[in-house]
Amino acid sequence: MDWITGIGRAIAYMENHLEDEIDFAEAAARSFSSPSHFARVFSILSGYTPGEYVRMRRLSMAGAELARGDVKVIDIALKYGYDSPDSFAKAFRAFHGILPSEARRSGAELRSFSRLSLKLTLEGGTIMNYKIVEKKTFRLLGYRRRFTGSPSERMEQEKAFFCETRLNQFLLAGMAKDADTQYGVMSDFGEDGYDFWIAGAVPDDLIDAHRSPEYVGEELADRLGLEPVEIPAGEWLICETERCQYPTLKHIPLRQEAVTNWLPDSGYELRDGPELMIAHWFCDERYQQRYAELWLLIRKIG
């Protein structure tokens, strides 16, 4: 209950300071967790980083106030933390699709982003296969792209990324000599988004050689766009999806289940670092036995 109460206290703190400078370390402290742990858990549960949540709540409230027509744009901009009318207008237009001055017009269409609220419901009672494994540092080789925007926009970017790199994925599987296993890596989480890798467990000698002119030629290596990604040593929570034809569709619910049902009573918190989703495709007639693994980097509390 302390963990649930803590998330609610953090949300209340952010909501009470939308017109002030928000100390996200203080928000994390109110959730009884470290800043990095709070940011990751908040993002997994809501789909937004704390900073994104605050920004959209402020722009939503700014739109409502401007629509009433009794305030100046510059006053609203300063009220919600923008240094200039230009920066406010740019953010406002990106969120609402219109300029702040247009919000006063009759029939102007604005967007509303509602406050998050916690609802206590009877949940759990589900079985999640998991293990905690100590791993040494290892490297993967893959294709990287940064995803930004809203959760739905990032999901569309991910779909496009997989489609656009289909041929390169076959090349990567050949280098790894494993057509059944595919690695997805999320790293460098920030307020603007995160890096996403389509990667493979390529032998180290090929990782070191892939940019060598003697191996594939310097021009070809650049055209392929392959980059190594280092996976740090540490303890990993490894969870499995159910066996099904399309296990990658179970990835997001599995993340939420891990941080909602397992993490609060585990004695662990999330560590800074990459997150892995490993799909086991079994490219034969056993399509219903496919599954995916979620890897979360964790550390003991205290």
Image (tube, rainbow, N blue to C red):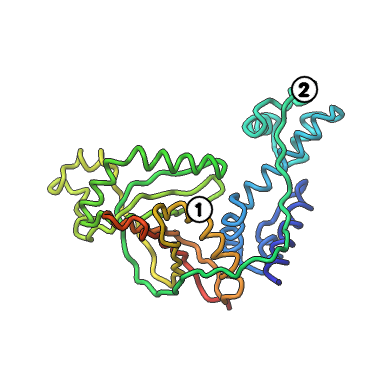
Identified by mark 2, the residue type is Gly
Name the spot of residue 199 as percent of width and height, x first: 33, 52
In the image, taking residue 221 as reference, residue 25 lies left or right, namely right
For the point 25% across and 52% down, which residue is it? 173
Q: Report the residue that reaches farthest toward the left.
A: 214
Residue found farthest to the top? 106
Q: What amino acid is found at the position of numbered circle 1 in the picture?
A: Phe
Q: Is residue 35 left or right of residue 241?
A: right
Q: How crowded is mark 1: few (under 14 residues within 10 Å), some or many (20 or more)?
A: many
The answer to whether residue 250 is seen in the rendering is yes
Instruction: Tell me where residue 13 appears, x and y as whole percent.
Output: 75, 57
**Mark 2 Cα within 10 Å, few/some/many (few <14, many 20+)?**
few
Vertical position of residue 101 compared to residue 276: above or below: above
Mark pair 2, 1: CA separation: 38 Å
Q: Residue at x 43, y 53 (%)?
A: 248
Label 2 secondary element: loop
Q: Mark on residue 107?
A: 2
Q: Which residue is label 1 attached to?
A: 189
Looking at the picture, tell me which residue is in the foreground, 63 or 128.
128
Question: Which of 12 and 258 lies nearest the eye of the viewer?
Answer: 258
The image quadrant that residue 117 belongs to is bottom right
Which of these two is toward me, 142 or 20? 142
Residue 145 higher or lower than 27, as above or below: above
Who comes first in sequence, dot 2 or dot 1? 2
Q: Can residue 181 be seen in this view?
A: no
Question: Where is 295 relative to 266, above or below?
Answer: above
What is the quadrant of the N terminus in the image? bottom right
Q: What element carries label 1?
A: strand
